[in-house]
Amino acid sequence: MGQSCFFPGIGQLANLRTLPHFRISQAKGCQLEELECLRNLRGELKIFGLENVSSFESAAKANLSKKSSIQGLRLSWDGTKEDCDDNINSVMEGLQPHPNLKDLAISGFKGSRFPSWMVAKDRVTVLRNLVRLTLEELGKCEQVPPLGDLPCLESLEMVSLHNVKRIGAEFYGLDINARRSASCSNRDGKPVTLFPKLSRFVLRNMGSLEEWSDAMVPSNSSSSIKVFPSLRYLELGGFSDDLDHFPGPHSTTNLVSLESLGLYGWPKITSLPDQIQHLSTLGTLLLCRFEGLEVLPEWMGSLRNLRKLVTSNCSNLRQLPSAEAMRHLTNLNYLSITRCPLLAERCTKGSGAEWPKIAHIPRIHIYPLNKV
C-alpha cells in the first residue's frame, strides 16, 4: 500500500515558499497539479510518487520550468505500478526544471529514455547551472545522457542503471555536429575540455555495463581532448559479471587531480587495473569485493602519495606487495583490512607473515581482529 500525501490541498497556499517534499497520490488534493500555483517555492523540493502521474499534461501542470527559485529537485518513482513506456517517458518530459536549478536527482524512473531537456542540443541551456546530478535505480534506460559539456557540473552519481551496456562517446557531450564545430573552432590546437569542473564521479552497480568508450574529435582536427581535469574523487565498479577486467576509457589514466579512488570488484576480477599505478596524486585507495584477488600488485609501490589504503570484503586476498614496495609508500599512515580473513590472519601483530611489511604504519585497523 502506497504512502499518502501529508498536506492535501496544499496548492491553495499560494504564497508558500518552502515545501521540502511532496508525495503524490490519487487522493483528492494530492495530485501533482497542486504545485501549479506555488510560484514562490524556493530551496529544495523532493517529489515522490511520480508513478501516479500518467501524462505529459499532468506533469507539466506542476510548472517546474517556471519555478526559478528552486535550487534542488528530486524526482522519485516509488512503486511497481506498471504503465506503458510512452506514458512514463512523456511524464518525464513534462517535468523540465528551470535553468536556475543546481541539484537534480532522478530515482526509480522506469522509462526507456531520458527526456529531451537532458539529451537534446539545447540541454546545456536548461542545465547550464547544474552543479550536482544523481541518477539511481533506472531499470530501463539503455544509454546515459550527454553530460560532458555542462559547464558547472561538479558532482555526478550514476548508480544502478541496470540496462546500460555501453557508455559511448556521446556521454562526453560531443555529438557529430559538435565535434565538427570543435574542429573548426580549435584549428590552433587548443584542447577541448570535457567535464571541466567535475570533481566527484560515482559509477557503480551497473550490472550490464561491458564497454566504456573515450571521447573523440574528428580525425581532421588538431585539437586534443582534456577529460575530467578537476576530478578528485572517483568510485567505480559492480559492472557486468561477464567481464574479467574493468571497462574504462584511456582518459581515466590521466587524472591529474585525483585524490581518492574506490574500486568495487566482482567474482571474475582477479587483478587491479594497471593504470592505477600512474595516478601520482592518489592519496586514498579503497578496494572492495575483489573475491578473485589474491595478491596486491607490486606496482602499488609507485603510489608515493598514498596515505590511506583500505581493503574490504576481499575473501581470498592473502598477500600485500613486497616489503620493498611497501617501504616506498612513505606517506602511508593508515591501513584498514576489513572482512579479508586470509590477509587479516597473515597481518597478525608480531606473528603474521605480512606483519613486518606493515609494522611501521602508524594506524592499522584489522577487523574482525582487534585494532593493533
Image: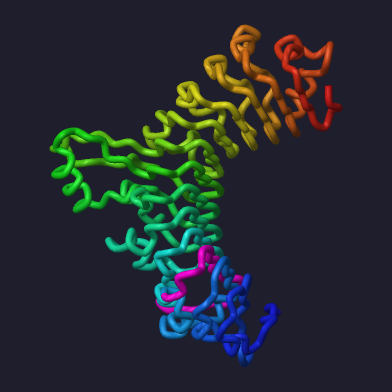
Image position, residue 372 (x, y; %): 83, 21
In the depicted structure, whether residue 213 falls above or below residue 99: above
Total residue callouts: 0
Image position, residue 332 (x, y; %): 65, 19
Is residue 127 in view from this perspective?
A: yes
> Viewer-proximal residue, 331 or 285?
331
On whether residue 177 falls in the magenta region, the answer is no
Residue 263, by quadrant, is: top right
> Which residue extends farthest bottom?
28
Does 217 sit left or right of 241 as displayed? left
Does 245 sit left or right of 9 as displayed? left
Image position, residue 356 (x, y; %): 74, 9
Image quarter (top left, top right, bottom left or bottom right) of the N terminus: bottom right
In the depicted structure, whether residue 132 falls above or below residue 211: below
Does 10 sit left or right of 347 as displayed? left
Image position, residue 186 (x, y; %): 18, 40
Q: Residue at x 57, y 72 (%)?
A: 47
> Which residue extends farthest top?
324
Q: Residue at x 39, y 48 (%)?
A: 167
> Viewer-proximal residue, 11 or 204?
11
Q: Residue at x 53, y 38 (%)?
A: 233
On whether residue 71 falls in the magenta region, the answer is yes
Is residue 88 in view from this perspective?
A: no
* Highlighted range, magenta: 66-88
